[in-house]
Image (cartoon, rainbow, N blue to C red):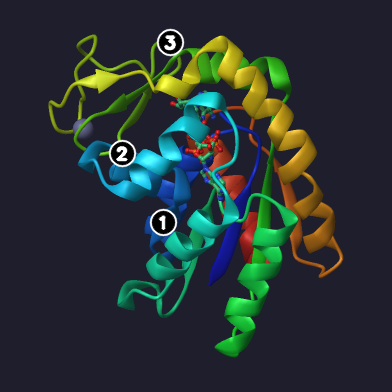
Amino acid sequence: MRIVLVGPPGAGKGTQAAYLAENLSIPHISTGDLFRANISQGTDLGRKAKAYMDAGELVPDEVTIGMAKDRMERPDAENGFLLDGFPRNVSQAEALDAMLKSEGMTLDAVLDLEVPEDEVVKRIAGRRICRNDSSHVFHVTYSAPKTEGVCDVCGGDLYQRDDDSEDTVRKRLEVYHTQTEPIIDYYRGQGLVVTISALGKVTDVTGRAMDALKKA
Ligand code: AP5
Ligand code: ZN
């Protein structure tokens, strides 16, 4: 399957993507994770992206689209993928359509995670991520690690993302409403959107997502 996951910052896209990708045997491709990996490796691309990310702005399309395309062309993505955080505006959605069309492919579904804004703010404020593996995501109250600051999975250090400060989160939410939400209408026009509530237990949300994708 070829799936796009969409939802506001902190909706639980990364959390759900880890389970969905495993259930569906497709790679989880997160442009945010790709940028953060480039930043920690000190690459040119990482240096370009960091200022935009720290400000809560979108990284320019000319950087983002090429990086996403390179990742989607890797052999593990041949039979499908779960995109998390890409596309993030209508021009990226159009670029993705063109990319898929040139290979004779189409998307199967766009899974839209709906969460009220006050819940999103709570989820982001308490989020902690493992330095060794960005798919090891915790929350100080909702899914606290057994030992404070230490990853349950691999023992790595947990940290708070630079762009999870209150001001930057406010900016990211504004960018989501103005630039990313329009892609939901764009894909609605193609009959691809399935919307689910992302409230409740993580496993319940995964169940809801799997049911919705089966019907898509
Ligand atoms: P990105 O990394 O994509 O961030 P985001 O979209 O803002 O989303 P988040 O990672 O903040 O949240 P999430 O929905 O994955 O939530 P999570 O599962 O962690 O992008 C960051 C930046 O990179 C952008 O601002 C931009 O600058 C740049 N960028 C990336 N892609 C780009 C693109 N295509 N174009 C241009 N720029 C781009 O969950 C959050 C917390 O909630 C966690 O603590 C988790 O444990 C908890 N949680 C999850 N589910 C539940 C639940 N059901 N109940 C309780 N707690 C829960
Ligand atoms: Zn870890």
Residue that mark 2 sits on: 39
Residue 126 seen from this side? yes
**Which residue shows up at 63% across the image and 28% down it?**
172
**Which residue shows up at 12% across the image and 26% down it?**
155
From the Cβ of disc 2, is ligand 1 less than 8 Å away? no
Q: Residue furthest left?
A: 155
**For discs 1 and 3, the disc positioned in front in the rendered view:** 1
Q: Amino acid at mark 3?
A: Thr
Q: Is residue 111 above or below residue 115?
A: below
**Neighbourhood count class around disc 1 (C-alpha, 10 Å): few under 14, some 14–19, many 20 upward:** many
Residue that mark 3 sits on: 141
Q: Amino acid at mark 1?
A: His
Horizontal side, residue 162 vs residue 165: left or right:
left
Q: Are marks 1 and 2 in contact (CB under 8 Å)?
A: no
Residue that mark 1 sits on: 28
Residue 26: quarter of image: bottom left
C-alpha separation, residue under disc 2 versus residue under disc 3: 28 Å
Q: In x, y percent, where is residue 97?
A: 67, 74
Residue 191: quarter of image: bottom right
Residue 33 seen from this side? no
Horizontal side, residue 145 vs residue 20: left or right:
left
Q: Are marks 2 and 3 in contact (CB under 8 Å)?
A: no
Q: Nearer the viewer, residue 62 or 82?
A: 62
C-alpha separation, residue under disc 1 versus residue under disc 3: 26 Å
**For discs 1 and 2, the disc positioned in front in the rendered view:** 2
| Disc 1 secondary structure class | strand
**For discs 2 and 3, the disc positioned in front in the rendered view:** 2
Whichever of callouts 1 and 2 sits on the residue coming sooner in the sequence is 1
C-alpha separation, residue under disc 1 versus residue under disc 2: 19 Å
